[in-house]
Image (spheres, rainbow, N blue to C red):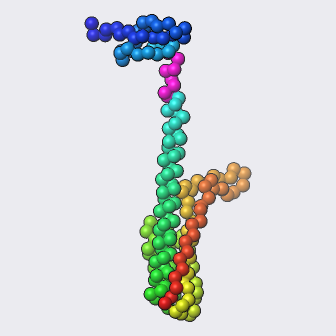
C-alpha cells in the first residue's frame, strides 16, 4: 500500500498518552494539535505581519546608505575645494564652484550651493580659507495635493546636508 498510515504519540490536555494518525513525518509529541486544525492560517497571518516590516527595514537601510554616501561625498568635495583654493589663490568663486561640482559624483550638481570665504583679494599666506557646501537630500519625493486649495505638501521634506572645510594658506 503506497499511502500507509503512520501513527504518532499524542499527549492530550489531560496528560494521557495515546495513538493518533500523524502527518507522515514520523513519531512526534504534540499537545492537543489535530491534523488540519484551527491554526492552519497562522503562517499566512505571520507572513502578512512580518513582510511589511522587513520591507520597511530594507528600504530604510538603503535610504540611510544613500544619505551617508551623499554626506561623505559632500565632505570630500569641500576638502577638494579647499585644496583647490590653496593651489589657486586667485581663482574666482565660480571657478571654485565649478571645480567642486565636477567632483560631486552622482549628486545633482545644480543643487549644490558653494560658498567660499574670504574673497580672492583677501587670500594671502596665513589666512584660513573656508569652503562651505549645502545640499538638499530627499529620499522620496511624495507630494500630496490639497483637495480644497491649490498646492501640495511633501510627506518627506528634504534634509539639508552641510559640509565645511577650512585650510590655512601657507
Residue 84 percent across, percent down from the top left: 46, 83
Q: Quadrant of the N terminus?
A: top left
Q: Which residues are the magenta region?
A: 36-44
Q: Residue furthest right?
A: 148
Task: Give the mark count.
Answer: 0
**Closer to the camera in the image, 170 or 2:** 170
Vertical comparison of 32 with 134: above or below: above
Per the image, is 38 magenta?
A: yes
Residue 152 percent across, percent down from the top left: 66, 56
Vertical comparison of 125 with 26: above or below: below
**Can the viewer see residue 65?**
yes
- Residue shown at 66%/56% (left/top)? 153
Secondary structure mostly taken by the magenta-highlighted segment of the chain: loop
**Closer to the camera in the image, 155 or 55:** 55
Left or right: 150, with 25 as reference point: right
- Residue shown at 50%/61% (left/top)? 68
**Can the viewer see residue 98?**
no
- Residue shown at 53%/45% (left/top)? 56
Residue 119 percent across, percent down from the top left: 57, 88
**Closer to the camera in the image, 104 or 79:** 79
Per the image, is 46 magenta?
A: no
- Residue shown at 59%/62% (left/top)? 159
Vertical comparison of 107 with 152: above or below: below
Amino acid at each position: 500500500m503506497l499511502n500507509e498510515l503512520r501513527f504518532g504519540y499524542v499527549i492530550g490536555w489531560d496528560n494521557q498518552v495515546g495513538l493518533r494518525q500523524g502527518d507522515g513525518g514520523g513519531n512526534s509529541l504534540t499537545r492537543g494539535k489535530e491534523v488540519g486544525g484551527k491554526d492552519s492560517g497562522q503562517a499566512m497571518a505571520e507572513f502578512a505581519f512580518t513582510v511589511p516590516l522587513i520591507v520597511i527595514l530594507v528600504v530604510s537601510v538603503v535610504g540611510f546608505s544613500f544619505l551617508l554616501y551623499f554626506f561623505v561625498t559632500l565632505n570630500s568635495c569641500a576638502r577638494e575645494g579647499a585644496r583647490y583654493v590653496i593651489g589657486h589663490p586667485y581663482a574666482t568663486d565660480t571657478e571654485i564652484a565649478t571645480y567642486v561640482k565636477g567632483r560631486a559624483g552622482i549628486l545633482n550638481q545644480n543643487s549644490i550651493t558653494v560658498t567660499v570665504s574670504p574673497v580672492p583679494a583677501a587670500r594671502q599666506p596665513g589666512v584660513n580659507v573656508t569652503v562651505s557646501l549645502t545640499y538638499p537630500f530627499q529620499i522620496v519625493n511624495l507630494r500630496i495635493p490639497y483637495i480644497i486649495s491649490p498646492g501640495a505638501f511633501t510627506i518627506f521634506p528634504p534634509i539639508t546636508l552641510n559640509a565645511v572645510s577650512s585650510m590655512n594658506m601657507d
